[in-house]
Amino acid sequence: MATKKKGTGLMMVWTDVPADKEKEFNRWYNEEHLAERLRIPGFLSGARYEAVKGGPKHLAVYELENVAVLESDAYKKVRNNPTEWTKRCSPDVIGTSFIRNVYTLIHPKTLTPAVAESDMAPALQLGRMDVPAEIDADFNTWYNTIYIPNYEKVPGVIRGRRFRAATGTPTYLTFYEFQNPKVSESAAWIAQRDIAPETQRIRPHMRHAQGSPGVYVKTFQL
């Protein structure tokens, strides 16, 4: 039976760290922390990425069965009993910026077996955004039925998913999986940007977080 690698939950941890701490920070993440998290039931897969556009620089992505995993006794036991290395190197200890957001899938509504069993992508483009309440319904309809499907036609785009924040801000996360980090610089991507008339009305209302949209390349995966 194929291994499930994606569910309906996502935990994203972004951070910048001081240059003199970066080497040990990377060792801690790669040699201890990622494996520790992935042993917890409900953590399906995880990988580390670095920004080539936008930020913060360091990103850890955890694909979860669902957001309830983070309320489990198994997760709380690990989180509440950090190792000595974690006490020294955790991004909430040494990070000059630190964002830990938890998300629930809103598009697509369900994952096909092929998507659920797919590996972590080589590159990501991530948009973190809010919109005014009065345009929220139109925004979601447009994003799910026009904007993402158009971009999914572009060569090099593996897929697009959208999430709503269960913990943290802004409200929405757009999660594009790319075959390489240059996809959103391609003529095909740029051609889709303004192809739909509806886009001209909706997109000006989007309020991006600092560093968004960001493009990230995968640096480590177990």
Image (cartoon, grey):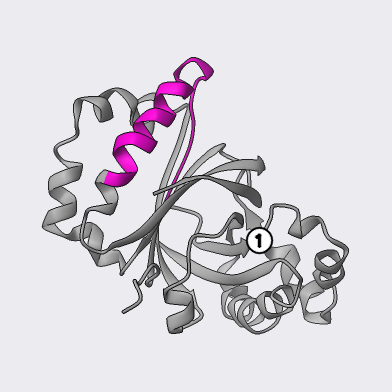
Observer-nearest residue: 218 or 61?
Answer: 218
Q: Which residue is mark 1?
A: 179
Q: What amino acid type is highlighted by mark number 1?
A: Gln
- Residue 118 on image: x %, y %: 47, 70
Q: Residue furthest front?
A: 1
Residue lying at 83% horizontally and 60% vertically, measured from the top left: 186
**What is the span of residues highlighted in magenta in the rendered image?**
12-35
Q: Residue 17 in magenta?
A: yes
Q: Give the class, few, some or many, for how many residues have Cα within 10 Å of label 1's Cα (few <14, many ≥20).
A: some
Q: Secondary structure at mark 1?
A: loop
Q: Is residue 83 left or right of residue 11?
A: left
Vertical comparison of 6 with 123: above or below: below
- Residue 71 on image: x %, y %: 19, 59
Residue lying at 68% horizontally and 55% vertically, measured from the top left: 180
Q: How many marks?
A: 1
- Residue 219 on image: x %, y %: 53, 42
Q: Is residue 77 left or right of residue 87?
A: left
Residue lying at 27% horizontally and 48% vertically, measured from the top left: 37
Can residue 178 be seen from the camera position used here? yes
Vertical comparison of 79 with 169: above or below: above
Can residue 167 be seen from the camera position used here? no
Q: Is residue 87 left or right of residue 160?
A: left
Residue lying at 84% horizontally and 64% vertically, measured from the top left: 190
Q: Quadrant of residue 132?
A: bottom right
Observer-nearest residue: 196 or 154?
Answer: 154
